[in-house]
Image (spheres, rainbow, N blue to C red):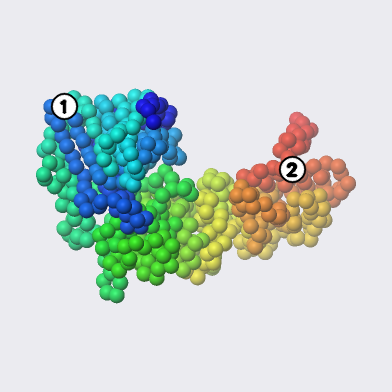
Amino acid sequence: MTMETLEFQAEARQLLQLMVHSIYSNKDIFLRELISNASDALDKLRLAKLQDGLEADTSDLHIEIEADTEARTLTVRDNGIGMTREEVVALIGTIAKSGTADLLAKLKEASEAKGDAELIGQFGVGFYSTFMVADKVTLVTRKAGTEGHGTRWESAGEGTYTIDDEPDAPVGTTVTLQLRPKDEEDALYDYADEWRIKQIVKRYSDFISFPIRLGDETLNSQKALWARPRSEVTDEEYHEFYKHISHDWTDPLEIINMKAEGTFEYEALLFIPSRAPHDLFQRDARRGLQLYVKRVFIMDDSKELIPDYLRFVKGVVDAADLSLNISREILQQDRHIQMIRRRLVKKVLSTIKDLMTSNPEKYATFWREFGRAVKEGLLSEPDNHKPILEIASFATTAQDEPTTLAAYVERMKEGQEEIYFLTGESRSQVVNSPHMEAFAEQGYEVLILTDPVDEIWVDAVPDFDGKKLRSIARGSVDLKKDEEEKAPEGDFAPLLGFLKEKLDEQVKEVRLSHRLTTSAACLVSDQDDITPALEKMYRAMGQEGPRVKRILELNPNHPLVAGLRSAHERGAEDPALPETAELLYGTALLAEGGDLEDPARFAKLLADRLARTV
């Protein structure tokens, strides 16, 4: 193929502009990103030879840095897996990631605030950071196992780049930066200075498992951090290692070290991030831990080592007794891997539980960022219901701050045997729900559950600490203690029968309510029926099931209900009564945030009724 001049994808163009006019005060990180990419390429080559039988020389895998002070260039070279022309275009010419719009919005916001947002690595586009320090970037690469020429890519960070064949390219990747003039006021240092290079490598990349060479000198120690005692490793070293494996540019929230000895030996170094990645809830997101065997990298995203509800955990597991050519299929069945997984889960959950008492602020950050994902474990891992519930926090009507279930149980009123909750789309919707009225009036605390997963897990968890979880919008509720306060059911029997007949297509039953104090009516699900929100979720996923009818409850003390009863007694054939029944049902549906089947008809009925009153 001949030389082509191609345009960057629109989002990539915007990102490049932000890099050229850098918002970051710490520009040193560009070198960390290049070294990290080179390390990944070396890992991939060794893995391809090990697992796919690729014919390649892996006797001296390394990263080489070359600085030319006169030409003002800096080169980072590796003899790793390399890339094809198509891969170069796909990986560098576009940002093939969802969430790009969100990234750009946050970067622009940070740019305007002149802050160090450090968001780029989160989206896996660290290569673009080279344009913080370079006027021009040239990349020459050749894929291992391919015959013939390599590929040359070049750009000045504007709207276009050129790509061409490179006949003599060696296997691997070479990135050469034409450095900008030094400008220390803008934190743009002389990156052709060997002292500066050594300082950056020592700080950010000392743990890289391949030698990083500058001339004849190896700059990094290549010591596996997980194999060193925690007392010998600084927090900064751990943080840089975390950033290397996670491509996150912020420090982790918590560090977890593990070491198992005996019949089956392994070491683990895990990290809990300080914020959720943009793709936490996207199915195609990469997840899992890095797997090593005797310090040899085996797999980058081993999902078998950590359950999906803890997919945000990053880190390394180094097993001593696994085969070097273990496959994903074998991993799924391997009893040692299953044992490691159980122990990792136990350790992560216990670490989070410890944070609740030792560092409540850290715990609050953790739950805010990852609580929604953790609750998925209540569906997938019944054996871990108790430890998951023990680290969970929920919004509540009793206070502004979230509460644990244990704290809720301690505050329960005398004689209360159940943990009350209500699901909904938002706090305001739940707090203002008619279902809440009697509970609020009598001082019962209710958990406010607004995450989509809450609609599902509450049915999978029977109880906590012997206390059953109970939705206040399902089944019958009777909080009244004074029998004299209750309206006689018989007095309303004719009206209830009439309403059931007129609303037969919408409701399965009409009855008097003891959960309402100010609203005229509300809709209730039977104890064993699925909720409307869950029904809607299933429909959104293409699972169309039978429509579930609900129960209409009336407040016998409300003027509208009392007036309706009187009107029915005066004349059951009054043509306005069926319309009133429709309006009563519609307002009950709207009050809980439901969707009317025929909004236009409801609006017309309401307008006609209002017109008669003015």
Residue 388 x, y percent position in the rendering: 43, 62
**Comparing marks 1 and 2, which lies closer to the viewer?**
1
Residue 217 can be seen, yes or no: yes
State the residue position of label 2. 583
Q: Residue at x 88, y 46 (%)?
A: 573
Quadrant of the rendered image containing residue 462? bottom right
Q: Residue at x 25, y 60 (%)?
A: 295
Q: Assess disc 1: are there few (<14), some (14-19) or many (≥20) residues with their C-alpha within 10 Å of its C-alpha.
A: few
Mark 1 lies on a secondary structure that is loop
Q: Residue at x 32, y 57 (%)?
A: 50
What amino acid type should be assigned to the residue bearing mark 2?
Answer: Leu
Image position of 575 with respect to 328: above or below: above
Indicate left or right for 519 with 215 as reference.
Answer: right
**Split into 4 quadrants, where in the image is the C terminus?**
top right
Which one is nearer the viewer's eye here, 51 or 111? 51
Residue 392 x, y percent position in the rendering: 43, 58
Q: Assess disc 2: are there few (<14), some (14-19) or many (≥20) residues with their C-alpha within 10 Å of its C-alpha.
A: some
Q: Residue at x 80, y 42 (%)?
A: 579
Indicate left or right for 341 with 196 as reference.
Answer: right
**Split into 4 quadrants, where in the image is the N terminus?**
top left
Name the N-terminal-most of marks 1 and 2: 1
Quadrant of the rendered image containing residue 317? bottom left
The image shows a total of numbered marks equal to: 2
| Residue 401 disc label | none
Cα–Cα span, label 1 and label 2? 81 Å
What amino acid type should be assigned to the residue bearing mark 1?
Answer: Ala
Image position of 391 with respect to 2: above or below: below
State the residue position of label 1. 71
Which one is nearer the viewer's eye here, 497 or 103? 103
